[in-house]
Image (cartoon, helix red, strand yellow):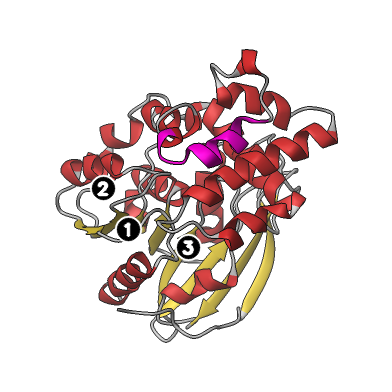
């Protein structure tokens, strides 16, 4: 089993204005002359962390990471205006042009897989490889499974905490009900909803529940950015023109070398989506990890992702 590469620090950190409202935090690590690879974080709204630099051989890769609009160190925090999938695709292109990169690998999990696929479909000529994990196609069936009914049958105890902030008469549409609270003018209402939404996902993201992951969302700023931006994207169906947009357009990227890694017991992004992508894109390498859920940090998923990154050097 492969473990993380050693801890490393960025050799370049900067802020990139991408609109009059939004500024992105961007960093570079590893080898400035190495193969460029872009880490695309999940959520949306999740942000990057130091461990995200460690999937890649720092001698071989020029590692680029950024916080998406409203997330992490990007500003303004938790901002929903000018924040759509297509704005994020624009931002990735802006980073590429700013750094004078002709073509690059993309690495993304969960929502990061959604955004990586969307960017690749929009700019296939700029992508040299796709390394994806915990596939999320943002279809209505996936959203209903996790936020309305489905995962609730596997985590009933945690589900009760998730639904607690929502009045009984609004529980026929939890995403809409949460959106109402997460955009409320009442700060106490916003923060309570953000904590419940975020801790539901944190509690269900690993095969073995991690209390440490749940506790991270005691941080109100982290919870608010994560929950507000996720709910904003989901109530707007990821701003896709059709429910099955990514699979309908996968033919545009089938020539690109790729790898798909999926935890067999992923509750957040169930294996059906990864399997559907695999069938539509059979040229990509495909791995079910038998003893894993959703998190990229789980041992089997982490190891396989590092192996794929090494193979694409």
Instruction: Tell me the element at label 1.
Output: strand
Q: Is residue 139 left or right of residue 93?
A: left
Residue on which disc 1 sits: 130
Spatial CA distance of label 2 from label 3 is: 18 Å
Instruction: Tell me the element at label 3.
Output: strand
**The quarter of the displayed image where residue 187 is located:** top right
In depth, the one of 88 and 71 nearer the eye is 71
Name the residue furthest top: 169
Q: Is residue 139 above or below residue 311?
A: above
Instruction: Tell me the element at label 2.
Output: loop
Residue on which disc 3 sits: 39
> How dense is the environment of label 2, judged by Cα within 10 Å: few (below 14), some, or many (20 and up)?
many
Q: Position of residue 275 (x, y in %)?
A: 22, 44
Which region of the structure is painted magenta?
153-164
Q: Position of residue 279 (x, y in %)?
A: 16, 42
Residue on which disc 2 sits: 253
Q: Earlier in the sequence, mark 2 or mark 1?
A: 1
Q: Is residue 60 magenta?
A: no
Quarter of the N terminus within the rendering: bottom left
Spatial CA distance of label 2 from label 1 is: 9 Å
In this view of the protein, can residue 75 be seen by the observer?
no
Q: Are marks 3 and 1 in contact (CB under 8 Å)?
A: no
Q: Are marks 2 and 1 in contact (CB under 8 Å)?
A: yes
Q: Is residue 155 above or below residue 168?
A: below
> How dense is the environment of label 3, judged by Cα within 10 Å: few (below 14), some, or many (20 and up)?
many
Spatial CA distance of label 3 from label 1 is: 11 Å
């Amino acid at each position: 089993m492969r473990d993380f590469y050693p801890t490393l620090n960025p050799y370049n950190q900067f802020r990139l204005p991408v609109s009059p409202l939004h500024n992105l935090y961007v960093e570079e690590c590893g080898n400035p002359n190495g193969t460029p690879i872009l880490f695309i974080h999940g959520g949306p709204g999740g942000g990057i962390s130091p461990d995200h630099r460690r999937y890649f051989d720092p001698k071989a890769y020029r590692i680029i990471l950024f916080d998406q609009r409203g997330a992490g160190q990007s500003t303004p925090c938790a901002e929903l205006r000018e924040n759509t999938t297509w704005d994020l695709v624009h931002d990735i292109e802006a980073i590429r042009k700013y750094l004078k990169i002709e073509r690059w690998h993309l690495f993304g999990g969960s929502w990061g897989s959604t955004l990586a696929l969307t960017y690749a479909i929009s700019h296939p000529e700029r992508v040299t490889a796709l390394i994806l994990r915990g596939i999320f196609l943002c279809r209505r069936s996936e959203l209903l499974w996790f936020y309305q009914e489905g995962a609730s049958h596997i985590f009933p105890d945690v589900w009760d905490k998730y639904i607690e902030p929502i009045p009984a008469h609004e529980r026929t549409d939890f995403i809409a009900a949460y959106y109402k609270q997460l955009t409320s003018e009442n700060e106490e209402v916003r923060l309570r909803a953000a904590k419940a939404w975020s801790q539901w996902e944190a509690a269900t993201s690993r095969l073995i529940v991690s209390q440490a992951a749940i506790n991270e969302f005691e941080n109100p700023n982290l919870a608010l950015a994560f929950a507000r931006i996720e709910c904003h994207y989901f109530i707007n169906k990821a701003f896709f023109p059709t429910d099955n947009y990514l699979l309908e357009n996968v033919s545009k990227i089938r020539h690109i070398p790729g790898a798909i890694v999926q935890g067999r017991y992923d509750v957040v992004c169930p294996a059906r989506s990864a399997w559907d992508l695999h069938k539509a894109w059979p040229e990509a390498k495909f791995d079910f990890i038998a003893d894993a859920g959703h998190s990229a940090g789980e041992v089997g998923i982490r190891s396989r992702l590092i192996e794929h990154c090494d193979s694409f050097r």
